[in-house]
Amino acid sequence: MKNTSEKSALKVLKCLIFCLLAALMAHGINRVLKIKGQEYGVYSSYAQYGGFYEMEKKTVDVLFLGSSHCYCGFSPQEFYDRYGIRSYNLGSSRQSTWLSYYWLREALKTQAPQAVVMDVYYTRVSSGDESSVQKALSYMKWSPNKAEAVRTAVKEFPELTFKSFLLPNIRFHDRWKELDREDFMLSELEPYKALKGYVPLPDRYGKNDFKMIGESEEDFVAASKAGIELQPKTDEYAEWPDTSKDYMGRIADLCKEKGIDLILVKTPTVRWTAEDHNAAVKFAEEYGLTFYDFNACRYYEALNYDYAQDNADEGHANVRGAEKICGFIGELLAGEYNVEAVRDDQWEKTAHFMEKIKKEFENGETGEAAESLSD
């Protein structure tokens, strides 16, 4: 009888060991197959969102949300070095308003920001694409918030399933063909957590095809005298998709409920029209918010921005452009919004890394800064 009991116990033990090994193997495969979101040689959604979860609770005073225009335009290290403001950039490629909303909710679990700065470029569309959704959600921790975000993703993209987010190997079983070193050596992406979501771009656009948006008759008169061509004057406004309207409203309501200042911005881009500007102004007025459009004459000129030199391409600020944008917003946060300077080792220890990144890009090189931080 005892021998039979021992055999049964051994079978149960073997079964448990098998299940454990299978689970570990599945976890390992899923970890490798997940899209790491590597872009521009320095950015990875793995490093960005993984780094955010490592931040000490209630130490991030400002959050940035939006698409790639956001993560190229706002450098948390720049804000800290110049103003002592502790911030984190949660922007992601083609980040639709519903993704911004769920990341805001996720962030509020551990942080209590005074202000949220949101670039409104992606209000113009309902969603980005599947890749952008995977990058934004793959590294969000599982919770009722993520479950709700995934259900929204499945609604926006019928080809996706809830199960594919639980087990990424279901969706990405063919991705083994494009795997590279970073998919296996995640430690090589670890140093870029220091950027806190920022993506420094070194290139210069070099073209002068940018046209400012006039907001008043005075803008057009002044531009005419200076020989500057503005976008055509119009009272028309772009119509946001219902999804964008819904989630922008949710973001505004959530910030109001939590006592957070919501600041709407748009960084310089030739892809932003006067109709887009008017739509954002209309929303800001409806919710009692301030909108800083750096495509409009008064704010573009206040930056002393040079589109050809300060943008990396048609839509994204380079390192120099980001410095100008951060300078304007930093003054605003420290002054009008009373975000206080706080010394914090989480930003102190990464200052040297950011300086090396800037020097690398000035010389057209990348990689050495990450190596120095991991030594």
Image (cartoon, grey):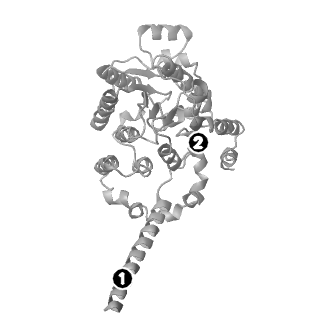
Foreground label between 1 and 2: 1
Outermost residue to the front = 2
Secondary structure category for the residue under label 2: helix
Q: Could you tell me which residue is drawn at 72 percent across and 38 percent down?
A: 363
How many angstroms separate mark 1 from mark 2 (CA)? 49 Å
Farthest residue in the right direction? 363
User: Does dot 1 land on a helix, a strand or a loop?
Assistant: helix
Q: Residue at x 28, y 49 (%)?
A: 155
Q: In the image, 370: left or right of 84? A: right
The residue where tag 1 is placed is 9
Name the one closer to the observer, 141 or 323. Answer: 141
**Closest to the observer, 237 or 51:** 51
Residue 45, given in percent of the width and then of the height, sits at 50, 47
The reply, left or right, for residue 307 in relation to residue 283 is right
Amino acid type of the residue that numbered disc 2 sits on in the rendered structure: Ala
Asked whether disc 1 touches disc 2, contact meaning CB atoms under 8 Å apart, the reply is no
Mark positioned earlier in the residue sequence (1 or 2): 1
Across and down, in percent, residue 165 comes to 37, 56
Type of amino acid at the residue the image marks with label 1: Ala
Asked if one can make out residue 34 in the rendered structure from this viewpoint, the answer is: yes
Question: Mark 2 packing: few (<14 Cα in 10 Å), some, or many (20+)?
Answer: many
Category of crowding for the residue at label 1, using alpha-carbon neighbours closer than 10 angstroms: few (below 14), some (14–19), many (at least 20) = few
Is residue 40 in view from this perspective? Answer: no
Examine the rendered structure and indicate whether residue 290 appears above or below residue 15: above
Q: Which mark is residue 29?
A: none
Considering only vertical position in the picture, is 18 above or below 243?
A: below
* Label ID, residue 194: 2
Q: Quadrant of residue 282?
A: top left
